Amino acid sequence: MHILGVTLPDNQLVKRALTNFYGIGTKTASRLCARVQIHDTARIRHLNQGQITALTAFLSSPANSPPVQVQPLAPPNFVPPPLAQPLPQVQQAQQPPPVDRLREIKIETDLRRQMRENIAHQRMIGSYVGRRHAMHLPVRGQNTQSNARTARKLNRIERYN
Amino acid sequence: MSLVAAARTCRAVHSTATPLAAAGAHVQTRGYATPAKPAKKTASKFKSNKKSKEDKKRAPRDAGLFRPMSVNNLTHPVFQSEQRMQLQLPLFRPEAITPTAATQALAFPQDESKALKAYGLPTNILVDYLLLSKPCSVVREATVTVLDQLDQAAGSSSKDTRVVFTGKPGCGKSYLLLQAVQYAIQKQWISLYIPRAINLVNSSTAYAYDPRTQTYGQPAFAQQLLKRFVDVNEALVRPLTVQESYPFDERSIGSGAPFLDLISVGLEYQHQAPTVLSALLDELAKQTQYPVLLAIDDFQALYCTSAYRDPFFKTIKAYHLTLPRMLLEFASGKRAFARGAVFGALSSQNTVYRPPLELIEALGLEPDRPSNPYVRREAELIEYAQGLKNFPVPERLTVDEAASIFDVWHQVKALHIPRGDEMFLAKYTEAGGNAREFVKKGLLQTIAM
């Protein structure tokens, strides 16, 4: 299955398959599954259309996704209303809902752009970090007399394209 | 001599060295003037050393261990019948279970009740039945006691008979519960058996929030459970009618409609299955025509925190899931069948879902963790565990019961040990009378390849 240009193999566990997105690791993937109510052993081929739509809608822009409704849990000795009766209106919870950290994440192009902008900003203000990126050298105080191979290979101003 | 001539003589020397004179080897002695006769083409007798070395080093390709012997070689009595013999055991029937019949092995009837296949089995029992040719079990004194209790409970509310089987790992709690279920089915009880309640809480099935009950339902599990219920209890449930009306969105079930209509809504529309199951249990609780047995293996899992998470990633307790909450309400007596009983069996197989302190104290077991007044106990769990009666399953098989088990495994020709007292008593003593250790570590370990 394809979501937003990323291939998710059908037989993979959903919480593992979501890590195929740039910017989503195991923790974020688990939280995303919980948000959309996908169980731990679900595979991509088990997802129904509603869940796929919810995932796609969230991943296309996490910041603009609708906030999660608080789902009140049954107190002890709770008797559910009969079927014929319409559902009672959900009262606003006395406590504010927990902070929804998932709306702050960035993935794919947004994340790469953010990282590029950070490096470009460092260069623009003339900082040490910016200079080291420009010189393709380690940024965080590592040794350069030996062992700077990765930095020489990958550190660029335009690193995260 | 020229190189060619030298080569030829070398070849000739080699060929004379071999005993295969008939291959056409010939010694070429050449005078100075005689013309060279063209060498006859002979088959090359060149044999590399590597081949012979390899042959010497390698053991025979197949020692004959896994090749089937021809039937004529199978003269030992063990091989007399090619196929495994069918277990010849008396059937597990209510009439056959008397105190005198205790310590006998009885086979569960497979033709009439589909219970074993429909409801499934706990994993450890399933593994046993894969090895034995027939599902069977040994009737113990504990079995007779439990079935007597079941008979007495047939007339009274299930609130009075809420029993939990406890005991050491491997003492036979799951088997006892299975025997109780089989007995109930044969005695024309309506049964609902959940062999692996852990699957309700380990996040292995889909879940969805239901705003009406304010709990998380498991539609796929509920639908499957309804299907199994119908498979086993259809004949009994067919004449029963519903006492209340259930106006579902898709189809309305009016009061007086048959039970099977209500169940068919759950079978057809998966998202309604948890509601239908709850309604079904309510209706079964009201009817008085048949007693109802609710049997749950892995009972302690209903009291644990589930592996599910809410949208804010907080853990969900088992009593906030629709199906476990329903089972807990019947187990605690908040809802009760007009006629029937609730049986549960603890299991120690899964160490993630262990019985919590509240359940241990309600059953009067010895706590294996701090239980002083400063330890936090959940009020909800205490409520859901009140009134449960502990039935301690004897941790040791008696010698006669163990002998019946020994006989059964021998009849199936699964063992390679002699059918004698010495071996039997040795294995029994090693296991200390524990049923699982006797079978798994005593008897089956003797089948060593």
Image (cartoon, coloured by chain):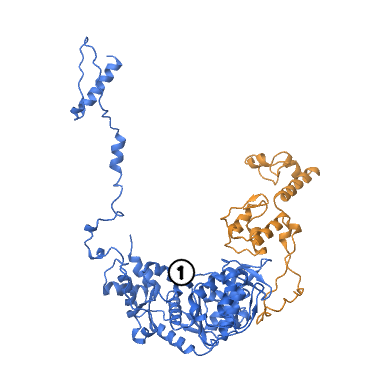
Chain colours: A orange, B blue
Give how far across and how far down residue A134 sits, in percent. 74, 39
Return the residue nearer the eye: A159 or B203.
Answer: B203
- Tell me the chain of label 1: B
Quarter of the rendering containing residue B386: bottom right
Q: Is residue B211 above or below residue B188?
A: above
Relative height, residue A36 to residue B121 (above, below): above
Q: Nearer the viewer, residue B438 or B61?
A: B61
Outermost residue, top side: B33
- The crowding category of the residue bearing disc 1, from other C-alpha atoms within 10 Å (few below 14, some 14 to 19, many at least 20), is few
Q: Would residue B195 be seen by someone viewing this image from the given angle?
A: yes
Name the residue nearer the viewer: B223 or B245. B245
Q: Percent from the top left, x then y, of residue B138?
A: 37, 78
Residue B145 appears left or right of B205? left
In the displayed structure, would residue B230 be above or below residue A27? below
The picture places residue B215, in percent across and down from the top left corner, at 65, 74
The answer to whether residue B121 is seen in the rendering is no
In the displayed orientation, state which residue is furthest to the right.
Answer: A125
SS class, disc 1: helix
Q: Given the image, on which type of amino acid does mark 1 rest?
A: Thr
Q: Which residue is mark 1?
A: B123
Q: How many marks?
A: 1
Q: Quadrant of the C terminus of chain A?
A: top right
Q: Position of residue B394 (x, y in %)?
A: 41, 81
